Amino acid sequence: MTERSVNPLFSTALWLPAALASIFLLIIAQFSFLFFHTLAEFFSIIVSFVMFAFAWSTRRFIRNNFLLFLACGYFWVGALDLLHTLTYRGMQLLNEHHTHDDIAIQFWIGTRYLEALILLYSPFAARQKVRGKPIFFLFACISLIITVLVFNDLFPRTFIDGEGLTDFKIYSEYLIDLILLAALISLFRCGEGIRYREKQLIAASIVMTMLAELAFTFYVSVYGLSNIVGHLFKLASYWLIFNAIVISNIKKPYSELLASERRFRRLFENNEVALWNVDLSGVHGELENLRKRGVTNLRQHLYENREIAPALADTIHITDINTASLELFSAETDLDPRAQSEQLMRTLPMSMFVEQLCAIWERQPNIRHEVVFRNVDNEELAAIVSFQIPETILEYANVPVSVVDITQRKQDEQKIWRQANFDQLTGLANRNYFTDSLSHTIDLAERQGDKFALLYIDLDRFKQVNDTLGHSMGDKLLNDAAKRLKENSRKSDIIARLAGDEFAILLSGTGRPEVIEPLVTKLLNSLAAPYDLSGNETTISASIGIALFPEDGCEVADLLRKADSAMYKAKEDGRNNFHFFTEEIEKEALRKRQLEQDLNRAIENQEFELYYQPIETLDAEVISAEALIRWNHPLRGLVSPIEFIPFMEETSLIAPLGEWILKQACQDAMHWDHHCSVPPKVSVNISTRQFQNQNMPALVKQILTDTGLSADRLTLEITESLMIDDEDSTIHQLNSLRLMGVALSVDDFGTGYSSLSYLKKFPVSYLKIDRSFIQGLPNCQEDSALVEAILSMAESLRLQVVAEGVETSSQANYLASLKCRYIQGYWLSKPIPQHDFCNYLNTKLNSHQSRT
Ligand SMILES: Nc1nc2c(ncn2[C@@H]2O[C@@H]3COP(=O)(O)O[C@H]4[C@@H](O)[C@H](n5cnc6c(=O)[nH]c(N)nc65)O[C@@H]4COP(=O)(O)O[C@H]3[C@H]2O)c(=O)[nH]1
């Protein structure tokens, strides 16, 4: 309900006392007019003084300018009314000269002018800043002037005995009524700062005063009826203004307090944050006692007297809790909340309580703690406990403490932290956590002069397990390997999975190889033991590189890199091995890094060039030419592919270079078409990596289309290792190439794997007997036997054979005697630059033709 909708003028509580008082005064008037007059006037005088007392004493809290202005004015109105009452005829309190009708009425008129003007100006005062003392002084002066005028007979006559009221008196009353009318209008038009309820009551009060003034224009005798009526109106007017100013202003703070209490109670009850009202007065009292006993450092005192803190904790009581608190305490709501809260309080950590005591002691304004504790169901909870230290002693009895349950947030944070720092698959630390720990261990070891070792572990040929048994089995193996690493390490060691099949261990507290070696051997042995992958028994080995702190480095990246390089060295040394980092490894790694940079630049600057080595029949007919790459190094001159091809195969650089070689070789073969009468085929070496990482049939098809070379002019030289991989995708790619018409040749035949069964599966056309078997011919019996066996096997499988590395005529003749049709080697020609190869072909053709 709005304030405007309640009209205070219709309230019985307002009119009933006024009506009763009027009846009472009317009865009195029948017996003694003087007594009636005195009572009626004293009522208004008391109202005026009470108004002033109330406004003056509350001016700093209420800050109501309107009220203060009115009250200051009414104080002096009351004072003048007192003079009016005391000078009334028959009062006999002053001497005879000063008590007669005219003097009392003069005071009356002067006072009413003052009152009317106060009411006229008060709405304007409501909008200004009113300073009490000057205003009070101003009204004091005006009242003094009126008093002086009246007592010195300087005030105009208002009443003449026997004649009645003078014109001055009557017209003054009219004028006062006019001023009051103006006050009424200004109250509603200008009184913006005044509450509507107050306005209504004051307006009614003004109307009553106006009626009173009118009544006072009628009497001839001061004891006449109109005088009685006028005084009753005045009584009503003062009663109304008293209600407007005093009662409503006294009621207001109480009703606001009540509303605010209700608001806060709602806020307390319906708050989603757990709120406890805690009685800290006991604690406060005890702390004050300690202070009085001369304790200056509470923390120190509590440390020296351990029993104090728990004793103080016992003085704390929870006086109130809200519903959110109940949820915090227990899932079972029928438990006694107060008992639960007391029990919960006891589970809060004492360290937190000591901190809070110190904060109260130091009079810190706010206290905020993150705590972990157990609720009545013994569940672990995390919460933020916070409260404000009260300003006054009284408030210590009721300190609101908020307890925000952050258990879920903590769990989420923990989960996120685990995800960010631990490997999901194995539960080991991840690279992030490991590098942080490494950095921390370095700092600590530097300060304490400790040593430690960093182990970099890589599983050998893990990819094969993954590819053959599938990723889930690969994951299981990684998991089992991680378990074995954990089982064979100390608790203090930090074990991490850095990526894929790479692990690392931080062995703190030891940097001595004689201690590390047995441990690493134990790790290698445990990793090499068979794994049961859902029925498939699999073995896998590992290679471990070791870097030592501080000998090998004092930086995280440095140590990791060096342990990694040492691990590669262990792999090169035959796997299932470990290697400590050495300077030589570093140099080798540096060389490789340099090479990688150089090769990258070489690809960009097109520093590569193709040479061709002919493959011929024994009667000198060039049937093909093998493309062999050379690197025109700006400083080193021509660099052999032996130096860089294996390295490029390790990195991803082989793909762009292999593509360039294939395209260039096809273009060169097309060039021979135009410059040689019998152009040969072209043979291009393709590394295993290219088949694994690229779609070779698509690439070959694209290049053949781009260059215009027909597929039957192209032979791809592949290694045995590619076929031994026996992957579906490889078989598929080779079949596609063969179907396109591209011939396949097995390079370095005989050096690879013992099983020859792959020859049945793969669509190969040529076998190239490795140079190492040709070198011993014709004298070495073993080589001769092997070459003979290869030739006879090839014949039965209908495969063509090329003998590589033929350097002498005796080798060539011997091969001819064995019916080997094709040969390649320095005996025929060394690899020739592309721009000279046409000459070679033409010369060869001429001599072949002249011979035939
Ligand atoms: N001692 C001796 N050596 C002879 C004789 N006849 C040929 N050679 C050398 O034997 C290598 C034959 O090539 P490969 O076995 O495919 O072995 C090649 C091949 O595996 C690789 N390679 C060369 N060019 C390429 C290429 O374009 N792509 C790829 N992927 N690998 C290539 O580099 C290896 C070495 O190539 P090169 O140094 O050019 O060495 C060539 C060649 O110069 C001989 O009578 N006596």
Image (cartoon, rainbow, N blue to C red):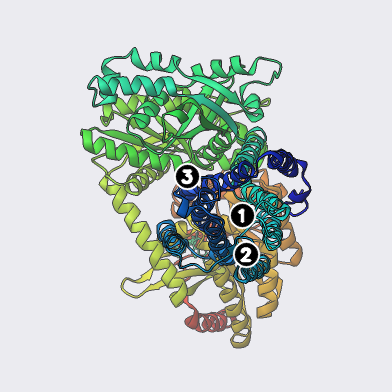
Q: Residue at x 28, y 48 (%)?
A: 584
Q: Which mark is nearer the camera, 3 or 2?
A: 3
Instruction: Bin the neighbour count of mark 1 within 10 Å (Cα to Cα): few under 14, some 14-19, many 20 and up.
Output: few
Mark earlier in primary sequence (2, 1): 2
* Marks 1/3: CA–CA distance: 128 Å
Residue nearest the observer in this picture, 12 or 405: 12
Residue pointed to by mark 3: 93
Residue pointed to by mark 1: 692
Mark earlier in primary sequence (1, 3): 3
Instruction: Bin the neighbour count of mark 2 within 10 Å (Cα to Cα): few under 14, some 14-19, many 20 and up.
Output: many
Compared to residue 832, the image places residue 420 above or below, namely above
Q: Element type at marker 2?
A: loop
Q: Which mark is nearer the camera, 2 or 1?
A: 2
Compared to residue 433, the image places residue 806 above or below, namely below
Could you say which quadrant of the image residue 116 lies in? bottom right
The C terminus lies in quadrant = bottom right
Residue 319, image x, y percentages = 56, 22
Asked whether, in this view, residue 43 is left or right of residue 770, the answer is right
Mark earlier in primary sequence (3, 2): 3
Residue pointed to by mark 2: 191
Q: Residue at x 53, y 53 (%)?
A: 84
* Marks 2/1: CA–CA distance: 93 Å
Residue nearest the observer in this picture, 42 or 699: 42
Residue 496, image x, y percentages = 46, 36
Instruction: Identify residue type, mark 1.
Output: Gln
Residue 198, image x, y percentages = 66, 54
Instruction: Bin the neighbour count of mark 3 within 10 Å (Cα to Cα): few under 14, some 14-19, many 20 and up.
Output: few
Asked whether, in this view, residue 541 is left or right of residue 359, the answer is right
Asked whether, in this view, residue 781 is left or right of residue 292, the answer is right
Q: Is mark 3 within 8 Å of ligand 1?
A: no
